[in-house]
Amino acid sequence: MASKSKPTLKIKKIWDNNGLLSSGVDYEFSESGHIDWKSMVLKKTDLLMPNRSWFFGREPESPKNVADMENPKEEQLALTLRATQWLLNARGYTNIEYNPICRISEGDKDIAVYSCKITFRGNYETDFEEVSYEAIASATESNTSGYIAQSYLDSTAQNRALSRAVRGFLGVHIVSDEEMGNVAPQGDVSDDGGKKLSFHTTLEKLWSEKNDGAFSTFVEFMVGEGLDITCSGWEDMSGKNLREALGILKKMV
């Protein structure tokens, strides 16, 4: 006898007289009496991730997750799509509408532009009137990264527009991971033979190709270029020094 599937339990949301969820959300409020969505979502560390674009150029690698970060600053964090969905559901909405603005797929051009219009539930902040908010976002091969994002540009553009609409309406000025462009790899790169090289090793290899490869002469040269390098070896160099030194060496003939 075939086993019966268990029915899905649907939990009904209950809204109070202020248009807020009666349970499940710990609200915080600003001095003006408005809901402080940014402070609320910043406490949802399981819905956040490191802002890859902030760490690129500052540190050789971006942290893998927020748990690896010690007292992270707001600008070092990014919202996941789950964070956007949590904000959306906690605020309450009655409709979401996506509309294609532009779709080009010709030769090497592949561009998707969508708008996302969200109709939010009324609450005490809106005199209990529904309010609509709309945002636009694009997705191309050049401003996305990863196989999934680049293979499904329409979905990527829609998710970006959704994130912008939610963040914009709720005043959560923290970038979402969905909106980040093509951030260059921050871990290892490969040489011509496919061998994995760290940024430190890459810099050492590049200096060897352009000079004698010695760290002492490298420091002397970089100090002459205006860099403040006080470390004793390649592996001790800071992310800032690595970025600046690589930029200088790549400009050398």
Image (cartoon, grey):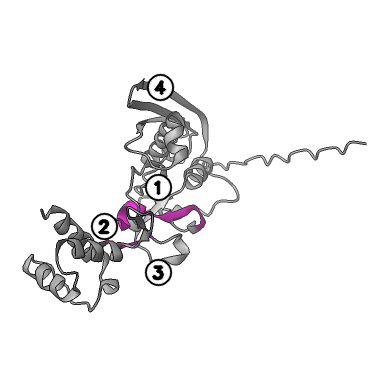
Residue under the image location 49 percent in, 56 percent down: 44
Coordinates of residue 88 in the picture (x, y in percent): 49, 40
Residue at the bottom extreme? 232
| The furthest residue to the front | 193
Whole-angstrom CA distance, mark 3 to mark 1, is 30 Å
Amino acid type at mark 2: Gly
Q: Which mark is residue 34?
A: 1
3D distance between C-alphas at marks 1 and 2:
37 Å
Circle 1 crowding by C-alpha within 10 Å: few under 14, some 14–19, many from 20:
few
Identify the image quadrant of residue 209: bottom left
Dot label at residue 100: 4
> Start and end of the magenta stretch?
46-62
Tell me the amino acid under the disc marked 1: His
Q: Which residue is mark 3?
A: 70
Question: Mark 3 or mark 2: which comes first in sequence?
Answer: 2
Marks 2 and 1: in contact by CB < 8 Å?
no
Vertical placement of residue 32 versus 229, above or below: above
Q: Quadrant of residue 66?
A: bottom left
Q: Is residue 231 above or below residue 131?
A: below
What residue is pinned by disc 2?
57
**Mark 4 or mark 2, which is nearer to you?**
2
Amino acid carrying mark 3 in the image: Glu
Instruction: Choose mark 4 or mark 1, whichever is in front.
Output: 4
User: Could you tell me how far apart the alpha carbons at marks 3 and 2 are, in whole angstroms?
Assistant: 19 Å
